[in-house]
Amino acid sequence: MIFKCKNCGANTVWSPEQDRMCCPHCDSIDSEELITTENEYQCPLCGAPVEPKPYDSALKCEHCGAYMIFDERIRGKYEPHLIIPFKISKSKAKEIIREQFDKKIFLPTGFLKEASLEKMEGDYIPFFLFDIHCHYRYSARAQKVRKWVSGNTEYTETSVYQLYRTMDADFNRVPTDASVTMPDNEMDLLEPFDYSSMYAFQPKFMSGFRGELYSVDGPTLEPRAKAKVRKDAAALMQETIGGYSSVVPECDDCQCQTKEENYALLPVWNYKYRYRGKEYLFRLNGETGKLVGKAPLSVGKMIGCAATVFSLVTAMGYMLRMILEVF
């Protein structure tokens, strides 16, 4: 399927700036009409052949630039329940990257150039969101040690305590990415997402961006979501235990039960930059603007800086020697 402008016939896309469908050619607002096609290997706008990968749910036609959504692929078990539309536009994403790295003096020259940043692509990444109830039981043997000196004698008082804690907590919409192409640690660093901006899934939100089907299902991801909950629950439990000299756990049991899971698409900007044969990847949360990635260092600039510093030190040493000879 493709969304086509009723006024000029161009591809209408979701605009993060205007928070609605927009035609980038005639600037019409909410003028879209849905055009479907039975052949997913042909662009319905220009007729050019397209080659979607097995897990593509939306992509850009390389010939005319229109964004196709493969409606046959987002049905049944692959139909998302929820989606957070892009709130950060490509121009805003470029601005965020420039602000983050503009003062880095050892960046390669082309890293922040418009031609490089324009290659950035917006992707809807598949996630499963889990609602999990946690029942936590904790017990420990704790000590408080107090020392003081009276006259010439040092005293030590040790108080022993038996600690018992129980906690019941609900963790809602715990995210776990369901893409084999996205590293889990990078996706974790992009959190949190603001779920108040989440909608029931509608294909129009995907127009203008690439989309990916989940390649790891919910039951496979559930243990990872529970591990996240146990980690957060343990941190909450530890906040209730303080002021002791030592704590030795005796029971540390966290039981997790999944109440609900939802398949969702979350927005991520991806920027790839190749330097000296190595690819550097940057991920930007398409809702909050949070950026993850480490920039390359220009070897030439580092050598040049080192040479400049060496020249200055040499010159200062020569001047100091001349002054000493005079006196």
Image: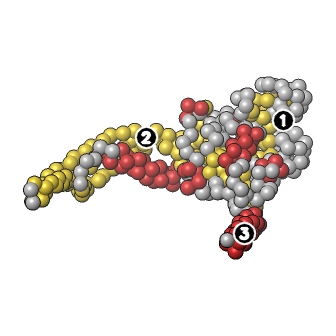
Q: Do the residues labelled 1 and 2 touch (CB within 8 Å)?
A: no
Q: Nearer the viewer, residue 129 or 165?
A: 165
> Is residue 172 left or right of 323 when viewed as pictured?
left
Residues packed near mark 1 inside 10 Å, few (<14), some (14 to 19) or many (20 plus)? many
At x 70% / y 69%, what residue is drawn? 323
Q: Distance between the residues labelled 3 and 1?
A: 68 Å
Q: Is residue 245 visible?
A: yes
Q: In which quarter of the image is residue 266?
A: top right
Q: Callout 3: helix, strand or loop?
A: helix
Q: Name the residue under label 3.
A: 319
| Amino acid found under the numbered disc labelled 1 | Asn
> Dividing the image into 4 quarters, which one contains the C terminus?
bottom right
| Amino acid found under the numbered disc labelled 2 | Phe
Q: In this view, does 93 lie above or below 156?
A: above
Residues packed near mark 3 inside 10 Å, few (<14), some (14 to 19) or many (20 plus)? few
At x 87% / y 39%, what residue is drawn? 45
- Name which of mark 3 and mark 1 comes first in the sequence: 1
Q: Callout 2: helix, strand or loop?
A: strand
At x 63% / y 47%, what residue is drawn? 291
Q: Can residue 226 be seen in this view?
A: no
Q: Callout 1: helix, strand or loop?
A: loop
Eye-nearest disc, 3 or 1: 3
At x 79% / y 42%, what residue is drawn? 68
Q: Residue 11 carries which label?
A: 1
Q: In this view, does 48 lie above or below 304?
A: above
Q: Nearer the viewer, residue 249 or 42?
A: 249
- Name which of mark 3 and mark 2 comes first in the sequence: 2
- Name which of mark 1 and mark 2 comes first in the sequence: 1
> Is residue 200 left or right of 148 when viewed as pictured?
right
* Relative image position of residue 100 (x, y in whole percent): 67, 47
Q: In which quarter of the image is residue 9?
A: top right
| Amino acid found under the numbered disc labelled 3 | Met
